[in-house]
C-alpha cells in the first residue's frame, strides 16, 4: 500500500483523546493556545474563556470579526450560572431539562467574563456540552472554555476531526478526535437576559421542546444588524460553490453538474440529474441534521459538482434549524 501524504500530514495534530492527549490539551490551553474540541453538536475551537489573549487567538485563527461574541462552555450548570447575574428560574428549569446538551443560554454577565468573550455586550452565552471528550477536557481544565465552531468565519461547520483540519490546518496545534458529531447542528441559542425568552439561533434542541418547558418563545428573523445576536449574519455556513434553494418542482435544473442535498423521497418523483447526497432516506430529521454539514462539505469538494441545490425540509423539529442554515448558506 502506498503511503498517503494527506493522512500523514493530518496525523500530526489530529489525535485520539487519550488521557495524555487531554493533559496536553490542558497545557496548551493554559498557555493561551487553541485546541480543536469535539462536542455533540459540531467541533469547537476552544481557548481559555477567561484569558483575553487566548480569546484573541480564536478570533485570529477563525478570521472572525470581533463583534461576534463567543459561547462559554462549562462542565456543569453550577459552573455556568456562577458567571451570570440575575439567573431567572426559567434558565434553571431549562438547564435541568437539557444540560448537558445542545442548548445555549444567554444571560446577564458578571464582571469576571472578559469583554472579548461577549464583544462588549452585557450578556454572556453559556453552554454545558454532553460529549464525553468535551466533558473530560472541561473537568481537567477546571474553568470555562470559549469555543466557536472550528471553521473559518462564514464557512461550513466541521462535524468531524478531519474537517477541522481542512478548515483551520496548521493554525491549531492539537485537534482531539472524538469521532463524528451525533447532533450535527450547533446548539439552540436562547436569549433569557430579558423577558420574554427569544430564540437567537435554531439548533440541536427543537424549539417545540423548549416551549414545552418555558411557554411561548419569541422568534426573530436573522438579520444583519440585530444587536441581540451579532452572529446571525445573513451569509453563513457557506460552501465555496453557490447553493440554491429550490422551492417548486418547476425550478429543478437540468444540469448534470448539480449536487443535491436530498431528504427522504423528496427527489424520487422526478429524474434528478447530477450527484445526490440523501440526508436521510427514511425522512428522519435527526438523521438529516447529523449528516447535514458533512454532506454539504462532500458536495462542495466533489469535482463533478458546480452548484449545490436543496429543497427546504419539513418546517418542524430539527427541520427548522436545518432550513435556517440552508437559507443562510444560500445567502
Ligand atoms: O453548538 C455550538 O453552540 C457550537 C459548539 C462548538 O459548542 N458553538 C458555536 O459557536 O456554534 P459559534 O461561535 O459558532 O456561534 C455562537 C452563536 C453566534 O451566533 C453568536 O452571535 C451567539 O452565539 N452569541 C454568543 N454570545 C452571545 C451573546 N452574548 N449574546 C447574543 N448572542 C451571542
Ligand atoms: Mg459558527
Image (tube, helix red, strand yellow):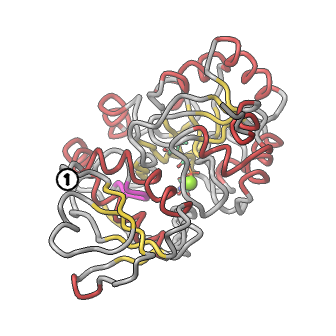
Q: Main secondary structure of the magenta part?
A: strand
Residue displayed at 42% across by 74% down? 258
Q: Is residue 31 above or below residue 84?
A: above
Q: Is residue 4 above or below residue 303?
A: above
For the residue labelled by badge 1, is the local secondary structure a helix, a strand or a loop?
A: loop
- Which residues lie in the magenta part? 197-202
Tell me the residue that label 1 is attached to.
Answer: 283
Can the viewer see residue 89? yes
Which residue is at the far front?
1
Residue displayed at 71% across by 31% down? 11
37 displayed left or right of 24: left
Give the camera-side residue of 107 and 209: 209
List x then y, in percent, for residue 169.
Answer: 74, 46
99 displayed left or right of 121: left
Residue displayed at 31% across by 56% down? 278
Q: Count the marks: how many?
A: 1
| Label 1 Cα neighbours within 10 Å, binned few <14 / some 14-19 / many ≥20 | some
Amino acid at each position: 500500500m502506498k503511503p498517503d501524504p494527506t493522512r500523514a500530514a493530518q496525523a500530526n495534530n489530529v489525535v485520539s483523546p487519550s488521557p495524555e492527549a487531554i493533559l496536553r490539551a490542558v497545557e496548551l490551553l493554559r498557555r493561551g493556545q487553541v485546541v480543536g474540541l469535539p462536542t455533540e453538536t459540531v467541533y469547537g475551537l476552544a481557548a481559555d474563556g477567561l484569558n483575553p489573549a487566548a480569546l484573541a487567538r480564536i478570533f485570529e485563527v477563525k478570521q472572525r470579526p470581533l463583534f461576534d461574541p463567543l459561547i462559554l462552555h462549562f462542565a456543569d450548570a453550577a459552573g455556568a450560572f456562577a458567571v451570570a447575574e440575575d439567573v431567572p428560574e426559567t434558565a434553571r428549569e431549562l438547564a435541568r431539562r437539557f444540560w448537558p446538551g445542545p442548548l445555549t443560554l444567554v444571560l446577564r454577565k458578571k464582571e469576571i467574563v472578559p469583554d472579548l468573550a461577549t464583544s462588549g455586550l452585557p450578556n454572556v452565552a453559556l453552554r454545558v456540552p454532553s460529549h464525553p471528550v468535551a466533558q473530560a477536557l472541561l473537568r481537567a481544565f477546571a474553568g470555562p472554555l470559549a469555543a466557536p465552531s472550528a471553521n473559518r468565519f462564514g464557512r461550513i461547520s466541521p462535524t468531524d476531526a478531519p474537517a477541522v483540519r481542512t478548515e483551520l490546518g496548521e493554525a491549531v496545534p492539537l485537534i482531539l478526535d472524538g469521532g463524528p458529531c451525533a447532533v450535527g447542528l450547533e446548539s439552540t441559542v436562547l436569549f433569557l437576559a430579558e423577558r420574554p425568552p427569544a430564540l437567537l439561533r435554531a439548533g440541536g434542541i427543537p424549539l417545540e421542546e423548549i416551549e414545552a418547558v418555558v411557554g411561548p418563545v419569541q422568534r426573530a428573523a436573522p438579520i444583519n444588524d440585530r444587536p441581540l445576536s451579532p452572529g446571525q449574519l445573513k451569509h453563513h455556513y457557506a460552501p465555496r460553490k453557490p447553493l440554491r434553494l429550490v422551492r417548486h418542482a418547476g425550478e429543478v435544473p437540468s444540469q448534470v453538474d448539480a449536487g443535491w442535498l436530498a431528504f427522504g423521497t423528496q427527489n424520487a418523483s422526478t429524474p434528478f440529474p447530477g450527484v445526490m447526497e440523501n440526508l436521510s432516506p427514511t425522512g428522519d430529521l435527526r438523521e438529516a441534521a447529523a449528516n447535514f454539514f458533512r454532506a454539504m462539505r462532500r458536495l462542495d469538494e466533489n469535482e463533478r459538482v458546480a452548484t449545490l441545490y436543496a429543497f427546504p425540509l419539513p418546517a418542524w423539529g430539527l427541520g427548522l434549524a436545518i432550513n435556517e442554515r440552508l437559507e443562510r448558506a444560500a445567502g
